[in-house]
Each structure stands twice: as C-alpha cells, then as structure tokens.
Amino acid sequence: MVALGALFQLSVLTFVPGSLKTGGLTDANFRAVLAPQYLRYIWDTIVLSALTTILTLLASYPVAYALARTPSARVRSLILVLTLAPFFTGAIVRTYAWMLVLGQSFIKWPVKLLFEPEGVLIGLVHFSMPTMILILAAAISHIDPVYERAAASLGARPSRVFLRVTLPLSLPGIVSGSLVVFAWTFSAFPTPELLGGGRVKMIANVVKDLALDSFNWPGSGAFAVVALVVTLLVLAVTSRMLGREAAADGHRPA
C-alpha cells in the first residue's frame, strides 16, 4: 500500500520536460493517458490476456487431467518434470529461445510470427501453461473418482462423464487458474518486449517507455494507476461471471 500510495502521488505531479524533478499537482497526466493512443494499448493488452487465458486453459487441461488421473507413477513423474522444467530457466532465456524458434532460424513458418501479436501470444501461452497445469491438476485430483464411476455405471459414455461430471466439478480450478493467468499476462513485460520487438506493446511496455525512454515518470505513474484500476475491474467482472457459471453448473443435474 505504501508503494501504491507513492505511485499515485507521483501520478498527480506535473511533468517537467528535460528534468527529473516534478512540479505541482495536476490531472494532466490522467487526461493524457485517456488519449486514444494509450487506450488502444490497454485494449490490446486485454485482448491478448483473454486469448492467452483461453488458449492456455485448452492446452493445459488434457495435461492436467493426465497428471491427476494417470495410474502409472512413472508417467505422472515424467509429466510433472516436464511441467516444472520451464521454471528452471529464467523468463529472458526462454524468451530468447522463442525468438530463435519463431524467427525462421530452425523452422520455416508459412507466416511471420516474430515481432507479431501471434508470436507474443505463443510465448505468453507457453509461459502460462505450467501454472495453469498445476492448478488444474490439484482441482481434478480432489474430484472423487467414485462420481465418475457412478455415472459410467448408469450408462454414461466417457465423453458424457467428462462433460457432466468431471468438468463441472473442476470449475473451481478453472476459475482460479484463469484468473491467475489473466492477471499475470496483463502485467507481462519481457515476453511482449522481446517477442514483440517494439511493434506489439502491452501495458508494462508502455509504462517502461514513458519512464525510462521519455523520463516522464508522472505520466508513467498515471498510466500504471489506470492499468491497475482496469486490471482490478476486469478481474472482478471475470471472477463474478466465472463464479456464477461455476455455481450454475454445480447445481445443474447430471
């Protein structure tokens, strides 16, 4: 709270071009942040974060299900090691590796991916998957297999058992994982900075440009405050929507 208070205090001070000193109180920084150019960066961040969350969930659920339901201890250990492996390297190292992969160095892609939104999206999904897998696996492992066996004994096909029993009961993990991934992606910096090459900008990149390139610390603080408010609003709305859906599915008869 102290740090956020200092950030807000900086955001309402006047920017003095060519100087690191600030002037008196002003609301010009927030009026500048609400310009169409900066609002577009906020919208692009929301879209990329939403797409990352959806794709991460789709890619992670089968892995998490296998991790939680595979009877072989060796297979579970292998999946767990592969899931945790990205944590053993830093974000910068992984991002540079993706730059080599997406930059036509090893694979000739039919479309350009490096320094494009699609390439940034791939990197964000890759970095988000380990966290999503662990959260989903924990949720699935807490589902008593008796419910699935009971549905199967009543004649439900495996696909129906999954859709009407396993998936609804794992919704708490889906909600938690989605919120964590969305919040993390919303503030991501190294991935869009390197894979975007300055052409794909998210909120953290704009804050860095204002603070370190333009030395506009008050403007950077104002943009960070606005981004924080937008993040909290989006998370609140998303959490309420997902929570209602989870509650509805939990009370819906199978």
Image (cartoon, rainbow, N blue to C red):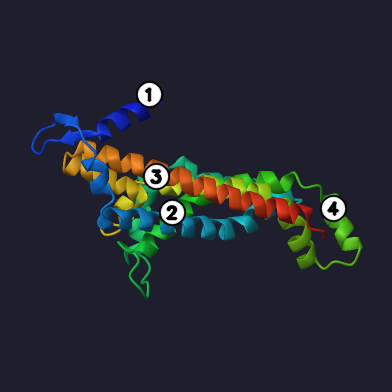
The answer to whether residue 21 is above or below residue 188 is above
Q: Which percent across, then down, holds residue 26? A: 21, 36
For marks 1 and 4, the one nearer the N-term is: 1
> In the rendering, which numbered label is found on residue 124?
2
> On the picture, is 217 further left or further right than 114?
left
Q: Secondary structure at mark 2?
A: helix
> On the picture, is 110 further left or further right than 161?
left
Distance CA(mark 1)–CA(mark 2) = 30 Å
Return the residue nearer the eye: 192 or 244.
244
* Amino acid type indicated by mark 1: Val
Name the residue rendered at 61%, 49% in the picture. Answer: 175
**Which residue is situated farthest in the bottom direction here?**
110
Return the residue nearer the eye: 119 or 188.
188
Question: Quarter of the image holding residue 44?
Answer: bottom left
For marks 3 and 2, the one nearer the N-term is: 3
Query: Which of label 1 and label 2 is nearer to you?
Result: 1
* Amino acid type indicated by mark 2: Leu
For mark 2, does the 10 Å Cα neighbourhood hold few (<14), some (14 to 19), or many (20 or more) residues?
many
Which residue corresponds to mark 4?
147
* Amino acid type indicated by mark 4: Tyr
For mark 1, does the 10 Å Cα neighbourhood hold few (<14), some (14 to 19), or many (20 or more) residues?
few
Q: Secondary structure at mark 4?
A: helix
Query: Which of label 3 and label 2 is nearer to you?
Result: 2
* Amino acid type indicated by mark 3: Ala
**Which residue is situated farthest in the left direction here?**
18
Q: Which percent across, then down, holds residue 233? A: 47, 46
Q: How many numbered discs?
A: 4
